Image (cartoon, rainbow, N blue to C red):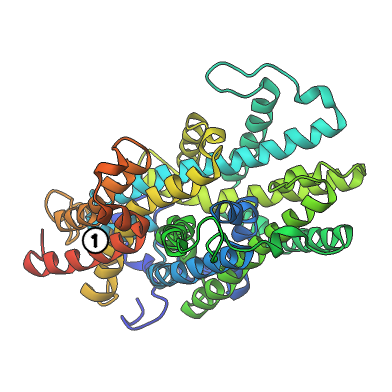
């Protein structure tokens, strides 16, 4: 094994005795140095590919709908991603150094069995996102087929589901394509990402150029004043909207800020993962959200109505080649984002629950099935609820997990992990019956203060009866949860180092 100070450590040579362990399978094993093929370009392409997607295109719409002008919305998105890339780079370090995935990394702080808690929380959020992206891909197929065959989009909504049989069939078809790629494995995913990154950026810029030319400029949205300016309907209320919006933007990638070791374990070096992420994420999110705002603004002039969904814009074109090319590009883009962002992690997370029975492929299938059951078309029906309930709500859980992991790895352990013990049934990470109660208490301490605000937001509690402090705390749920869990974990770990 290399020296402890080495940037890349070959952890596989020390695991000969772990193969029979309950906590080991080939998908969760460390990646050897020979298997780490992702350079700076591949890491940057990963983020460009994941960030350049339809939800990013539409992200600013919710912010503008709540009163921001276009520049405030794009800046909020950019700043949120600058913030979230910091824990992302920090959590990626262990993956790159030791070659281990997210659920194995969690064992150091939460315990070999307790790691099921953050793994399951992260996996369930990913299932929701998987469903959303699969729905978007299926919706693209449905709408563009409707241009060629208008009768295809008619039909009575199915009971409970609330969508037509053909709409649901398109969703299931795209779901099947996702499952096929999962079955092919991680190398197929990397090829998809490298193909998608330049393709979708080119498609976005082409759409931007078309909109500018067709509208003779970018139209009214880019000249629309902020609703928070003096004399406007929400004058003086900017900060009350800005902070929960910023938290929502952090929450957009809070999932990946935890499970980034699932990808960084394939990186060639720390430099590659750091620069690749820093260069790939914030700028792409800002650029693609601006494209969404600018094109949407132009549609107000071109079509006399505001079209936030790029699929709705594309279906206005009548050239069959344009429609087929756009359909292919959108489906490929959505597929690559979905697999990378929403399947790799939960597949590994579900494998953590029973490593000897659940492989990466079976974990991916479980993710897909839960994604159907969650009925994602209902999850994103309301843009305001999407940002202020879905994104902020789950960030209140994921922020504390990140706080625990970073406090443990960088402050408490000084980046030193005992890799064989991470796969052992009786090693140093067993704690109390396999669970670190210090980590569990820190997680609860970080998450619970946001609960009253969340319950008020979803109208389980009367908002008027919830003190304003809890509303304010909920608006910064990820940041508050991260900070509280970080401090509580270190204090408790010092008081009870083996608990």
Residue 226: image x %, image y %? Answer: 59, 63
Quadrant occupied by the C terminus: bottom left
Out of 141 and 230, give the one closest to the viewer: 230
Q: Is residue 3 visible?
A: yes
User: Residue drawn at (57%, 66%), measured in percent from left and top?
Assistant: 72
Which residue is the extreme one toward the left? 495
Q: Is residue 79 above or below residue 151?
A: below
Q: Is residue 185 visible?
A: no
Q: Is residue 291 above or below residue 115?
A: below
Tag 1 secondary structure: helix
Count of number-bearing discs: 1
User: Residue drawn at (63%, 63%), measured in percent from left and top?
Assistant: 225
**Horizontally, is 489 left or right of 46 in the view?**
left
**Horizontally, is 68 left or right of 119 in the view?**
right
Residue 123: image x %, image y %? Answer: 41, 45
User: Residue drawn at (47%, 32%), measured in percent from left and top?
Assistant: 374
Q: Is residue 262 above or below residue 154?
A: below
Out of 275 and 80, give the one closest to the viewer: 80
Q: Which residue is mark 1?
A: 109
**Horizontally, is 27 left or right of 224 in the view?**
left
Residue 477: image x %, image y %? Answer: 34, 57
Could you classify mark 1 by the number of other residues whose Cα lies within 10 Å: few (under 14), some (14-19), or many (20 or more)? many
Out of 151 and 433, give the one closest to the viewer: 151
Residue 302: image x %, image y %? Answer: 84, 51
Quadrant occupied by the N terminus: bottom left
**Horizontally, is 299 left or right of 319 in the view?**
left
């Amino acid at each position: 094994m290399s020296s402890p100070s080495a940037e890349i450590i070959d952890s596989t040579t020390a695991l000969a005795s772990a193969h029979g362990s309950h906590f080991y399978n080939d998908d969760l094993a460390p990646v050897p140095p020979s298997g780490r093929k992702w350079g700076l370009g591949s890491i940057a392409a990963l983020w460009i590919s994941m960030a350049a997607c339809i939800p990013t295109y539409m992200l600013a719409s919710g912010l503008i709908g709540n009163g921001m002008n276009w520049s405030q919305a794009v800046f909020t998105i950019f700043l949120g991603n600058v913030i979230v890339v910091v824990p992302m780079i920090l959590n990626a370090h262990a993956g790159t150094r030791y070659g281990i995935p997210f659920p194995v990394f969690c064992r150091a702080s939460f315990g070999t069995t307790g790691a099921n808690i953050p793994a399951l929380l992260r996996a369930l959020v990913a299932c929701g996102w998987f469903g959303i992206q699969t729905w978007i891909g299926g919706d693209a197929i449905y709408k563009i087929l409707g241009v060629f065959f208008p009768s295809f989009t008619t039909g009575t909504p199915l009971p409970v589901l609330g969508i037509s049989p053909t709409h649901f069939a398109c969703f299931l078809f795209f779901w099947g394509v996702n499952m096929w790629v999962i079955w092919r494995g991680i190398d197929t995913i990397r090829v998809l990402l490298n193909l998608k990154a330049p393709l979708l950026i080119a498609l976005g810029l082409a759409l931007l150029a078309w909109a500018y030319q067709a509208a003779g400029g970018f139209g009214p949205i880019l000249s629309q004043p902020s609703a928070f300016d003096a004399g406007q309907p929400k004058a003086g209320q900017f900060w009350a909207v800005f902070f929960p919006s910023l938290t929502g933007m952090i929450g957009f990638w809070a999932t990946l800020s935890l499970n980034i070791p699932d990808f960084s374990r394939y990186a060639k070096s720390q430099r590659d993962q750091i620069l690749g992420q820093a260069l790939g994420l914030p700028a792409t999110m800002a650029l693609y959200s601006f494209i969404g705002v600018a094109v949407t603004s132009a549609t107000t002039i071109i079509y006399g109505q505001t079209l936030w969904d790029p699929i709705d814009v594309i279906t206005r074109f009548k050239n069959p080649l344009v429609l087929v090319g756009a359909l292919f590009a959108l489906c490929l883009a959505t597929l690559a984002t979905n697999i990378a962002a929403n399947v790799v992690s939960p597949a590994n997370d579900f494998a953590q629950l029973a490593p000897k029975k659940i492989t990466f492929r079976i974990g991916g299938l479980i993710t897909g099935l839960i994604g159907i059951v969650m009925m994602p078309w209902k999850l994103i029906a309301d843009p305001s609820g999407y940002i202020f309930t879905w994104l902020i709500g789950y960030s209140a859980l994921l922020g504390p997990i990140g706080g625990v992991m970073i406090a443990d790895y960088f402050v408490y352990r000084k980046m030193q992990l005992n890799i064989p013990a991470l796969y052992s049934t009786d090693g140093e990470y067993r704690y109390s019956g396999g669970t670190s109660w210090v980590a569990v208490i820190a997680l609860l301490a970080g998450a619970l203060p946001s609960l009253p605000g969340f319950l008020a937001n979803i109208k389980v509690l009367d908002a008027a009866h919830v003190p304003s402090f809890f509303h304010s705390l909920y608006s910064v749920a990820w940041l508050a949860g991260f900070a509280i869990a970080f401090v509580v974990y270190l204090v408790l770990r010092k008081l009870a180092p083996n608990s």
